Image (cartoon, rainbow, N blue to C red):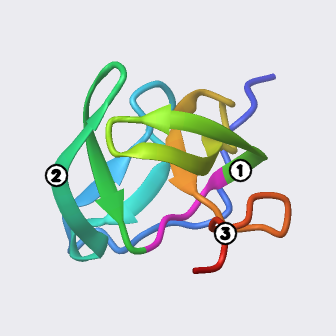
Amino acid sequence: MTRSKTFQAYLPNCHRTYSCIHCRAHLANHDELISKSFQGSQGRAYLFNSVVNVGCGPAEERVLLTGLHAVADIYCENCKTTLGWKYVRTEYFPAGPAS
């Protein structure tokens, strides 16, 4: 018996969409793209306003090109492939000392 893929959300076919490279789960509409001017550890990174079909790992501090940030890995909900990370703000990672 073949199991069909089910995703939490399907994006409209009339728009250009971004999807998981491994399972093709829809992730974002092109209209949600904010910037392609980011650089990740494995190459170019995209910044989106909103995404679908992703899960989020725990927040942690990482040193990025622009300094220390609180981020959390995001992964495809369907195949669990790590897709990148998102900026987070939590009580565990304060913005810094008050001036």
Side (left or right) of 29 relative to 15: right
Crowding near the residue tagged with mark 1, few <14, some 14–19, many ≥20 C-alpha atoms within 10 Å: some
Labels 1, 3: front one: 3
For this orientation, the residue located farthest to the left is 37
> What is the quadrant of the C terminus in the image?
bottom right
Q: Name the residue under label 2.
A: 36
Q: Quick check: 71 above or below 81?
A: below
Q: Mark 3 points at which residue?
A: 97
Helix, strand or loop under label 2 = strand
Residue positioned 39% across, 62% down in the render: 28
Mark 2 and mark 3 residues within 8 Å of each other at the beta carbon: no
Residue 22 pos. (x, y %): 47, 24
Q: Mark 1 points at which residue?
A: 55
Residue positioned 69% across, 44% down in the render: 77
Q: Is the magenta stretch mostly helix, strand or loop?
A: loop
> What is the quadrant of the N terminus in the image?
top right
Q: Is residue 30 magenta?
A: no
The CA span between labels 2 and 1 is: 22 Å
Q: Quick check: 3 above or below 96?
A: above
Q: Give the range drawn in magenta.
A: 50-54
Residue 67 pos. (x, y %): 42, 43
- Amino acid on which disc 2 is placed: Lys
Mark 2 and mark 1 residues within 8 Å of each other at the beta carbon: no
